[in-house]
Image (spheres, rainbow, N blue to C red):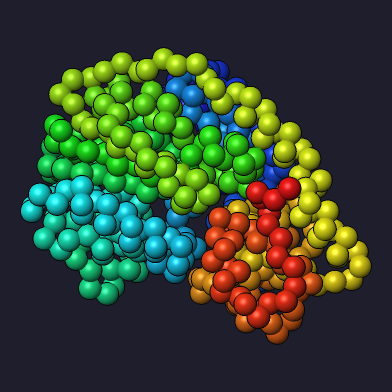
Amino acid sequence: MICASITQCRGCHAAIDRCEVVLTMDPMPLAGVFCPTEATALAAPLIPLTWVLCSECELVQVAENVSDATLFSHYNYSSSSIAGLVQHFVGYAEFLKARYSGSDRLSFLEIGCNDGVLLQRLPQHWNLVGVDPSDVALRATTSPVHYTLHNQPFTLGLVLDQHLEGKIDVISGSNCLAHISDLRSVFEAVALALRIGGDFWLEVHDLASLLRGCQWDTIYHEHKVEWSEQSLQRCLAPLGFSHVQTLKTPMHGGALRICFRKESHRGSSPVQPNVLRPLLNRLQEAYHHRYETKAARLLIKSKQQGHCIAAYGAAGRANVYLNQLQELRFDYIVDEAPLRVNKFIPRVATPIVAQTRLLEQPANDCLITAWNYREDIIRKNPAYSGTWLTAFEED
């Protein structure tokens, strides 16, 4: 069985009856899957997709759980191949170096290190550890790196086996908390590994930004949860973490960089009113009217007139968009990552092609599904003379 329904909240372990449904989307294939042939794409299995809200910690999460082994044994995302992400991690590395400039022998552990895009930019005299179960992380270490990789999930067992209890000064996780099935156990492992006074840095999608932008394309099985500052505080305070700082970044269309500190005692969860409810209702309306956006209407009309239409950016968001608007039949979708080129979008079987196709087979209209990189994509394609459209943030 490819998935099972969750029986408790991933963040706080509240019973499932404390979670209520806030959005039901059309069943779709896994957004992180890119198929080798048209036939395998057409046969890709469909999985229900339901968003629920925990009333205890206010974590929003997907009710259907796909095992980590299914999601990450053949991972299609290498962070260093995405220019915008590289730029982000260059900035994050500089931020961390400045923050801990007085620490010569800092012990730094990254959860979900991918291909080392952050760790390789941190000082070599730091004790650097990466934890990531993906094949992408393992392949990255076939070349010389200056960090130690544990090619497995971050768990209490790993901390105990590697004798890391109280040994780590700083733990960081960038966009990895969205992909973990049992977050409570991960938080307990972080609390065990950090020394008293150690920092836990998190970069997560900003749920409020997602909701304000009606970004339903960010909702898929690999994104098991979406965080707000309040839900993180509610999950971490009972484990002995205090909130230190929250910064906003433009990563992935709006993200939070939040620091929590391990204290010598456990605190209580902050109780605040839920201000996201009206935004959740607005997101639901936007999803149900997804064919009525300016971009969708123009693309449908263009296709009816016999024009070639294309998309740009074959990431998870594109899989969601193309599968949730199946009346839009794109001729191809452009991507710059070699891992995805010459594959197919699951179920709709749209071919993924290299950037050169945009000039070899010009599209009348090109929808930027990777809309958070819109300006960078347009800048890279000055010779394209068709119409650029944006999946979101366009009225």
Q: Is residue 370 left or right of residue 191?
A: right
Q: Quadrant of residue 167?
A: top left
x 91%, y 67%: residue: 305
User: Could one spot residue 298 in this view of the protein?
Assistant: yes
Q: Is residue 75 above or below residue 28?
A: below
Outermost residue, right side: 305
Q: Position of residue 363 (x, y in %)?
A: 76, 74
Q: Is residue 188 left or right of residue 354?
A: left
x 26%, y 39%: residue: 200
Q: Is residue 106 above or below residue 190?
A: below
- Total marks placed: 0
Quadrant into which the N terminus falls? top right
Q: Position of residue 277 (x, y in %)?
A: 60, 23
Q: Position of residue 148 (x, y in %)?
A: 20, 59
Q: Is residue 124 left or right of residue 349?
A: left
In front here: 65 or 200?
200
In front here: 99 or 47?
99
x 46%, y 62%: residue: 84
